Image (cartoon, rainbow, N blue to C red):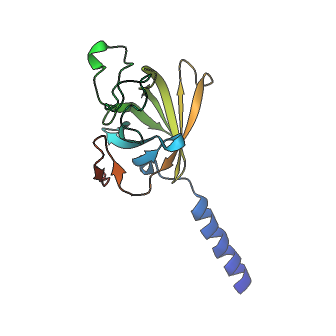
Amino acid sequence: MRISLLILLSMFLATAAFASAEPNDLFGVWLTEGGGAKLEIFPCGEKACGKVIWLKHPNYVNSGDGPVGMEKVDRKNADPALRSRSIIGLKVMEGLSLEGDWWRNGSCYDPQSGTTYQCKMRLESATELRLRGFIGISLLGRTYTLSREQSSPMQTANNRVTKYVPH
């Protein structure tokens, strides 16, 4: 009897440990593949939005990208009036609605190319987020894996150290 109870308890705990993350677990800070940027994903009404809150290299480091030492800006935006916006603070995700396990029907902006894509995302676990950007149909796109940021100081464009405080 004791062994059966122990096995049942072990199975229950294992199942709880592997259960999928809650939809609101999406909100917070996520590190992009390669660690070049941190995105804050936050609620905007009933939808999810995201913005860049940190860059590993907030200033241009080679003249082919922009003026060396200057803050990175949205220089490839199709709208010339928006090309002087700082990348840090730039809203790059918006309009994602929760449908089952997926956040869908939103748009994701890539400041490196100046292109806006349709996107969808899903929590794989409490620490892993899959984001798929595409044009037209999801099959014609690319998947990115973001990792949950562990609360730590972050460097901003002016090289100040700040602490992330959720909304």
Task: Report the residue at 63% width, 24% height from top.
Answer: 139
Q: Quadrant of residue 12?
A: bottom right
- Direction bottom: furthest residue: 2
Q: How many marks?
A: 0
- 54 in relation to 140, above or below: below
| In front of the other: 1 or 82 | 82
Quarter of the rendering occupied by the N terminus: bottom right
Q: Is residue 136 left or right of residue 166?
A: right
| In front of the other: 94 or 105 | 94
Where in the figure is residue 107, as x and y percent of width and height? Answer: 43, 26
Where in the figure is residue 154, as x and y percent of width and height? Answer: 36, 51
- 90 in relation to 23, above or below: above
- 43 in relation to 20, above or below: above
Where in the figure is residue 48, as x and y percent of width and height? Answer: 38, 38
Q: Is residue 18 left or right of residue 109?
A: right
Q: Is residue 106 left or right of residue 122?
A: left
- 78 in relation to 45, above or below: above
- Is any part of residue 83 visible from this angle? yes
| In front of the other: 108 or 113 | 113
Task: Report the residue at 31% width, 44% height from top.
Answer: 156
Where in the figure is residue 76, as x and y percent of width and height? Answer: 39, 19
Task: Report the residue at 63% width, 75% height from top.
Answer: 9
- Is any part of residue 1 visible from this angle? no
| In front of the other: 38 or 75 | 75
